[in-house]
Amino acid sequence: MLAVDNLNGSRSAQTIALGKFQRKIDATKAFSSDTPAGAAMRGIASALALAGAAFSLQKAINDPDGLNVVKAGVDSASAVQKTADLLRSLGVKNSVVRGVGGGWTIALNTGAKIGAGELLTLATAMIDGYKAVGYFRKGDIAEGALSAGIATGGVIAMLPAILGTGSVAGPVGIAVMTAFFVGQMVWQDAKHIHDGEDDVRTGLIILGYKPHYAAILCKRGAYGSGNASGKGQMLALMNYAKSRDMDAAVLRDWINGLTFTQVLRLSDVVLHEIGVGNGNLLSDPEEAKKLSPYVIAPGAGALRSGFPASSGLGRAGVRRRMAADFEAALLDKGIQLF
């Protein structure tokens, strides 16, 4: 029991010390608009707001649902306000900039004062909270959690103005919003990366490709697979075919003449070559002729890429892979050429 009591006492002391430390930080107003840390925080907030506005506008254009349009409007206004706040912290004297950036406030009955930034943050938090409930009802747990995280970060970010909790809450809220916003963008990219593959598969079947081969070749590079992420195999194969003067019918007949296992291997090789930047797969023949023969040129090119001139890469550079390299990889996998 003694050990437990001591442990509890230690935790209590740590909590008191932490509270004192936070109050000291709050008292210093370390993140006020006239401090370097405050200006840096506002720079991050402005960049986040601009990215959020662009993301919301794109979403509203793709899906002009009423809530998406309102969210785009609120996020755009928030981007203007956050930019004005940044300019104000950098010493811009314009009265409109200073007012929009935080000079114009509304006094609440509690004695707290809130400005345009807090009102817009509150609106964003409410919209994202509402969207989170909708996503959860639809069973979309990931989207719901991300929207809920953005809403939570927004509430934390506005605590200093509304509840007077101190300046530390602002950066914490922005950090939370940033993390969940970035997560939302990544999730959106990952979720939609394979959109349209069924249409490509149907088109290939119409063009005469075997259905089970079309089902393989319609696939795009998986999310997170480097340069191949989201890239289509058939465009790469058509670029390669044109570089070897193959027409569409010859390409189709060559692929249809392969075994199922060979087509699986062909798909792997195509996506790998896209990932490493094969010039003849990523560009049409005329554009491919203009490409440098090196991804990293020897000598000065290697130095610019961070490799010492005396190193292996510095002396030889990194040669760009082209059609001949693709063919060598096919042969290595037991796939006969056309």
Image (cartoon, grey):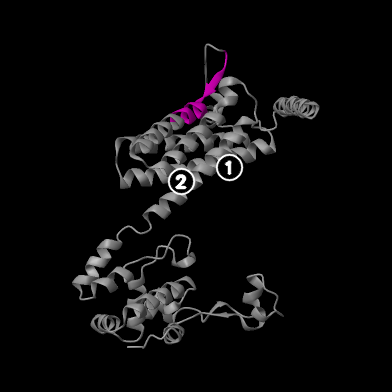
Using a 10 Å C-alpha cutoff, classify the residue at mark 1 as few (fewer than 14 neighbours), some (14 to 19) or many (20 or more). some
Query: Where is 295 relative to 92, above or below?
Result: below
Q: Is residue 92 visible?
A: no
Residue occupying the far top of the picture: 109
Work out which quarter of the rendered image holds the C terminus and state it. bottom left
Quadrant location, the N terminus: top right
Residue 12 in percent (x, y) is at 74, 25
Q: Position of residue 189 (x, y in %)?
A: 42, 53
**Quadrant of res 331:** bottom left
Q: Residue at x 46, y 35 (%)?
A: 148
Kindly tell me whether residue 201 is visible in this rendering.
Answer: yes
Q: Amino acid at mark 1?
A: Ile
Q: Is residue 233 above or below residue 48?
A: below
Q: Main secondary structure of the magenta part?
A: helix
First-in-chain label (1 vs 2): 1
Q: Residues within 10 Å of mark 2 (few under 14, many from 20)?
A: many
Residue 117 lies within the magenta run? yes
Q: Nearer the viewer, residue 41 or 215?
A: 215
Magenta-drawn stretch contains 190? no
| Front disc: 1 or 2 | 2
Q: Which residue is label 1 attached to?
A: 44
User: Which disc number belongs to residue 273?
Assistant: none
**Which x, y percent locates residue 308?**
70, 75
Per the image, the residue denoted by label 2 is 184
Q: Quadrant of residue 29?
A: top right
**Secondary structure beneath disc 1?**
helix
Describe the element under mark 2 as helix, strand or loop.
helix
User: Would you place residue 150 above or below residue 230 in this image?
Assistant: above
Amino acid at circle 2: Gln
Q: Is residue 122 above or below residue 243?
A: above
